[in-house]
Image (cartoon, rainbow, N blue to C red):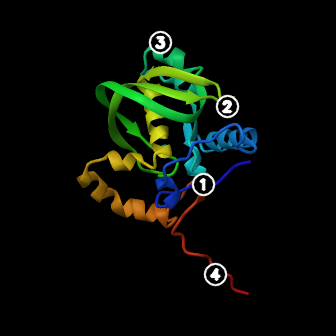
């Protein structure tokens, strides 16, 4: 089932996600719906708050980068199989030089900006079977995880921009909250004016 993606301005996107455990109901169905929703909107990552659930869960599928010939052979090879569920993730460390990557977000359509983040992260998380992992990621993989991890912390990539840049984007962001934007996937806008039903 394709779920509506919450747009910028929705208070749920600002909540710090709560941990979940094995008793979380119908997790397999939720994951199936999240992957379907992400693929339909051509995303490479999706966090639970974006579909209205303030829990510590996000998914990543970076396999489309397999065809990105601006990347090294080694990175393409890694990304070609990088599909992962992250539950109760905790970034333990972020290191190596910051680099700029042009980020976008399904909750903030039509805005892309360069964001600086550390190149490498060490993260612990549980997979869909609640098996624990501690792994190191770098490059694009780290970048996607950092972006999605921010979502479960209530942070959006626009928060990372300079005050000037944020000021310049304010009008566009307000329009997104109000639904004054064309999007070809299902979204829910927090400040959209209710349609009047006239008989
Ligand atoms: Co996002």
**Quadrant (top left, top right, bottom left, bottom right) of the C terminus:** bottom right
Labels 2 and 1: the sequence-earlier one: 1
Q: Position of residue 153 (x, y in %)?
A: 46, 45
Side of 35 where 80 appears, left or right: left
CA–CA distance in space, label 4 to label 3: 55 Å
Q: Which residue is mark 2?
A: 128
Q: Position of residue 103 (x, y in %)?
A: 41, 40
Is residue 99 placed above or below 21 in the rendered structure? above
Closer to viewer: mark 2 or mark 1:
2
Point 46% across, 55% down: residue: 14
CB of mark 4 within 8 Å of CB of mark 3? no
Point 47% across, 12% down: residue: 74
Labels 4 and 3: the sequence-earlier one: 3
Q: Position of residue 99 (x, y in %)?
A: 31, 29
Labels 2 and 3: the sequence-earlier one: 3
Mark 2 surroundings within 10 Å by alpha-carbon count, few (fewer than 14), some (14 through 19), many (20 or more): some
Closer to viewer: mark 2 or mark 3:
2
Q: Which residue is mark 1?
A: 52
Point 33% across, 29% down: residue: 118
CB of mark 2 within 8 Å of CB of mark 4? no
Residue 43 visible: no
Q: Which residue is mark 4?
A: 196
Q: Which residue is mark 3?
A: 74
Q: Secondary structure at mark 1?
A: loop
Closer to viewer: mark 1 or mark 3:
1
Side of 100 where 111 appears, left or right: right
Is residue 15 placed above or below 25 in the rendered structure? below
């Amino acid at each position: 089932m394709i779920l509506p993606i919450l747009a910028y301005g929705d208070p749920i996107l600002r909540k710090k996600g709560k941990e979940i455990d094995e008793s979380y109901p119908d997790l397999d169905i939720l994951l199936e719906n999240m992957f379907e929703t992400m693929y339909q909107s051509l995303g490479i990552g999706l966090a639970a708050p974006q579909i209205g659930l303030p829990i510590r869960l996000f998914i990543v599928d970076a396999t489309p980068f397999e065809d990105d010939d601006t990347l090294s052979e080694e990175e393409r090879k890694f990304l070609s199989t990088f599909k992962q569920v992250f539950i109760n993730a905790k970034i333990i460390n972020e290191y190596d030089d910051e680099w700029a990557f042009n980020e976008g977000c399904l909750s903030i359509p039509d805005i892309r900006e360069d964001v600086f983040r550390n190149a490498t992260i060490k993260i612990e998380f549980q997979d869909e079977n609640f098996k624990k992992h501690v792994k190191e990621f770098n490059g694009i993989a780290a970048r996607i995880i950092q972006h999605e991890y921010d979502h479960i912390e209530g942070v959006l990539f626009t928060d990372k921009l300079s005050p000037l840049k944020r000021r310049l984007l304010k009008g566009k962001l307000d329009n997104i909250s109000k639904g004054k934007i064309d999007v070809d996937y299902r979204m829910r806008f927090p400040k959209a004016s209710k349609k009047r039903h006239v008989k």
